Image (tube, rainbow, N blue to C red):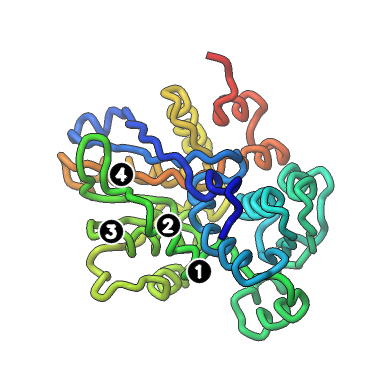
């Protein structure tokens, strides 16, 4: 069992927030955002759910901790580092980078939490799903549980499946939406619900639908879910001024999103409404999968201003 002090970490508090937008009003569509709040800011959104059963396995099987993968500004790495630090566990991460930047705020936080960081060039990083490479990593860390990138596995999807996203404060949702990158969250939502589910891809990855399908444990689930890949823009982690302006407009109503995951997907959802690809009079449930820590990385790379960082992260005084 997890330690009693970690229950809040694994059992987050759920809250709902309604989105106001002229397009939604024109189509008479309700859009509710579901947030998950934990005791740790870095373990936000879907991360506490995707790590829940991995951490249970670590403790119950006697592992010393976790070894995993992630990019240099990864929300997943921050969440793993914070969880393991809180629980007194060891954490090791293979980072997609040629060199570990000591000024990178994400990696600095991970180090502060005691995580060991190992640089992995992009060529080697692409092998992270290959059995031979996985065996190599597990052999190098026999005392650690290997957690896939993003926590996307059967265990990660199981944690997500336990979250009720269909019951909004104003009634059952007609459609559940979320940002989709590694696929585990989308699969978990499909596994846990009977209503239609839409994943809005934030990466250009032709293998994403297959990875999601492999994690779905329901028969005949194909008609209930799909992935929309029309809003990836130039690719993962890239955004234009229009998307940034949209994130600012959401922050004005205290809906805090960033342009990499939640902001890109939420803007896509509203565009789908505008294009009549979502029926009028619908009630939508949008899962806020977190990711606001990534704003530090955007500021670090001068992709957003200090003013935008303060606004989008919700740190601007009212």
| Closest to the observer, 111 or 293 | 111
**Residue beneath label 3, please?**
193
Task: Tell me the CA gap for discs 2 and 4.
Answer: 15 Å
Q: Is residue 8 above or below residue 316?
A: below
Q: Is residue 23 found left or right of 127 in the rendered image?
A: left
| Residue drawn where x is 62% and y is 72% of the image | 61
Of the numbered discs 2 and 3, the one sitting upstream in the chain is: 2
**Residue beneath label 1, please?**
153
* Residue 263 visible, this angle: no
**Residue beneath label 2, please?**
160
Give neighbour class at mark 4: few <14, some 14-19, many 20+ (Cα, 10 Å).
many
Cβ atoms at labels 1 and 3 below 8 Å apart: no
Residue with the most extreme bottom position: 132
Of the numbered discs 1 and 2, the one sitting upstream in the chain is: 1
Give neighbour class at mark 1: few <14, some 14-19, many 20+ (Cα, 10 Å).
many
| Closest to the observer, 114 or 185 | 114
């Amino acid at each position: 069992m997890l330690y009693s002090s970690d229950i809040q970490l694994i059992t987050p508090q759920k809250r709902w927030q309604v989105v106001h937008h002229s397009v939604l009003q024109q189509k008479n569509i309700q859009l509710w955002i579901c947030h998950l709040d934990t005791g740790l800011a870095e373990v936000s959104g879907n991360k506490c759910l995707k790590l829940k059963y991995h951490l249970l396995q670590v403790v119950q099987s006697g592992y010393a901790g976790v070894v995993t993968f992630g990019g240099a500004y990864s929300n997943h790495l921050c969440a793993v580092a914070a969880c393991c630090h809180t629980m007194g566990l060891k954490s090791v991460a293979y980072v997609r980078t040629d060199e570990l930047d000591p000024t990178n705020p994400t990696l600095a936080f991970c180090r502060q939490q005691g995580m060991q960081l190992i640089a992995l060039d992009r060529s080697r990083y692409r092998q992270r799903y290959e059995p031979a490479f996985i065996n190599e990593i597990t052999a190098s860390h026999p005392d650690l549980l290997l957690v896939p990138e993003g926590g996307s596995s059967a265990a990660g999807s199981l944690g997500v499946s336990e979250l009720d996203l269909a019951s909004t404060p104003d009634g059952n949702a007609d459609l559940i939406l979320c940002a989709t990158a590694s696929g585990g969250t989308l699969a978990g939502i499909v596994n846990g619900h009977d209503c239609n589910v839409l994943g809005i891809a934030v990466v250009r990855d032709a293998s994403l639908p297959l990875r999601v399908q492999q994690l779905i444990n329901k028969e005949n689930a194909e008609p209930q879910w799909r992935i929309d890949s029309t809003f990836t823009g130039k690719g993962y982690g890239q955004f234009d001024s229009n998307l940034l302006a949209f994130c600012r407009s959401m922050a004005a109503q205290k809906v805090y999103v960033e342009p990499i995951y939640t902001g890109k997907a939420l803007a896509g959802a509203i565009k789908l409404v505008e294009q009549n690809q979502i029926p009028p009079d619908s009630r939508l449930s949008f899962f806020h999968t977190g990711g606001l820590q990534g704003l530090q990385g955007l500021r670090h790379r001068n992709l957003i201003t200090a003013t935008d960082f303060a606004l989008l992260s919700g740190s601007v005084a009212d």
